[in-house]
Image (tube, rainbow, N blue to C red):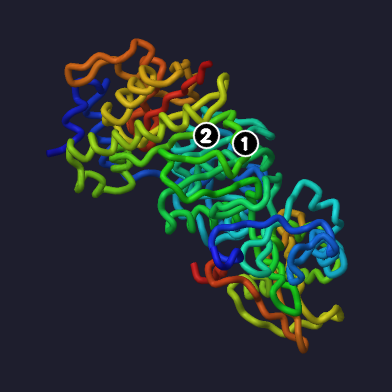
Amino acid sequence: MDPLDRYESVIDDVPAFRAACERPLPTVVRVNTLRATRSAAERELAESDIATERVDWHPDLLRLPDDQPGANWPYVHGWLHGQEEVSALPATVLDPSPGDRVWDACAAPGSKTTQLAALMDDRGLLVGTDANLGRISALRSNAERLGVTNLAITHEDARTHSLAPFGGDSYDHALVDVPCSCEGTVRKNPDAFEEWSLDRVRSIAGVQKGILSRAIQATRPGGTVVYSTCTFAPEENERVVDHVVETETCRPVAIDLPLDGTDGLTAWDGEDFDDRLTRTRRVYPHHNDTGGFFVAKLAVGE
Amino acid sequence: MTDDHVGTRFDRVAKTEAERDREHRPSRAAICEFFAERFGIEPAVFDEYSFWERGKGKIWAFRGDLDSPVEIEALGMVVLRADQKHWKPTTSAAQQFGAAASECVVNLDETPARRFLAGDSQDLDWDGDWGYVIVTHDLDGERIPIGVGLYLHGELRSQLPTGRQRDLDAQ
């Protein structure tokens, strides 16, 4: 089956949504502000005859309409990192400050981790966790190329993350960008649906609940946790957030999202969710010509 | 564990030679002195950093500090191999701290800079010391470090690891 059929009842403009999912995704790079300014990156890409376009909602993103990043001086010097436009959302929403203690629960290969480091100006403690050593190798290599030096990497299941190596103190913020069924990446990976099944969605949702619960427990009262996926499936989005709102001490807070989207769902498949799930945000591919995304911001309570 | 130098254990290096718990292990003072004497990088550049050893002679720099030892997968960046007679800074260290270097710096024009980036060795007429050098080029009005070279017998050998080499002329 085509999993996108499931969403026709909740999407505002189905033909536009379908058409956007068929189009390839524009190439986008994030300027690494630890190493360069956007103006310097624009000048040097122009020197390499690479055309750029600014992205109106984010000051550090540049679209490359005709090129791939990789073989140019700005990339070599860690001024740039290839990152899908919409995947810059969760770190933007979390918005950590220099000196904070931050956990990236599913860090590899590191696009969002290195974006967090840039927002922290490479100051404070950034802990990146991943369960897969091969992906950790990619995370390390990206962090070193981009000049991130405040990052400690742990190899473990995020559901049982230990604070012991970091003195036992809880975090100010956590980013939980979980492994998901990736329906929203269909423009980048046309085979995203090949292994799709509702059983797989339900099974992965169990892991997502475990990771998000651990992140809330590991964050101090008054801190924030951002949960995100690149899928449309409510079982992996609103339903996971609804679960932790019931079982952990946290509440969804409004997000001032700098690009178009719709409110999160409060009901799906015969099940009602907490009314505050409207404070989560869904971004569909036709809204901003990006991939699909879901993001929730949770305030951690006493 | 029978060998505490392998696996995931990081030990913070001692402040001075006298405080070392193992004779071979470099001290923070020795690491700062190496960067200062060879490259003219002021020790103050490392003020916010702690240095750690994982595996014999592999030194990591972490911006911040943790209780030592710590068992994790990575901590900051690998900056130095101190397990041989001539200590060798990493490409990442050159890119991160090389802009603060004033000695043993070789600045290349565009064509030789591209050859260095591609991993090539090339003849170089330079009157500095033999050994490891920080290789830079000018970009957007700044002198930007590319990586580490080995200068011997009038030849500059690129030390960029294969994964960091790029052929900018191959497009």
Residue named by callout 2:
A91
**Residue A87: image x %, image y %?**
45, 38
Residue depicted at x 41% and y 16%: A279
Residue A209 placement: quadrant? top left
Residue depicted at x 57% and y 50%: A80
**Residue A201: image x %, image y %?**
24, 36
Q: Residue furthest front?
A: B2
Q: Residues within 10 Å of mark 1 (few under 14, many from 20)?
A: many
Kindly tell me whether residue A296 is visible in this rendering. Answer: yes
Q: Tell me which label, 2 or 1, sits earlier in the chain.
A: 2
**Residue B95: image x %, image y %?**
69, 59
User: Chain under label 2?
Assistant: A
The residues tagged by marks 2 and 1 sit, at their Cα atoms, a distance apart of 8 Å
In the image, what residue type sits under mark 2?
Ala
**Foreground residue among A135 and A284:** A135
Classify mark 2: helix, strand or loop: helix
Q: Is residue A108 left or right of residue B30?
A: left
User: Chain under label 1?
Assistant: A
Kindly tell me whether residue A56 is visible in this rendering. Answer: no
Q: Residues within 10 Å of mark 2 (few under 14, many from 20)?
A: many
Q: Do tag 2 and tag 1 residues touch (Cβ < 8 Å)? A: yes
Q: How many marks?
A: 2
Q: Residue furthest left?
A: A1
Residue A48 placement: quadrant? bottom right
In the image, what residue type sits under mark 1?
Leu
Residue named by callout 1:
A119
Name the quadrant of the N terminus of chain B. Answer: bottom right
Q: Is residue A261 above or below residue B164?
A: above
Classify mark 1: helix, strand or loop: helix
Residue depicted at x 22% and y 20%: A268
**Residue B4: image x %, image y %?**
60, 64
Q: Is residue A293 above or below residue B64?
A: above
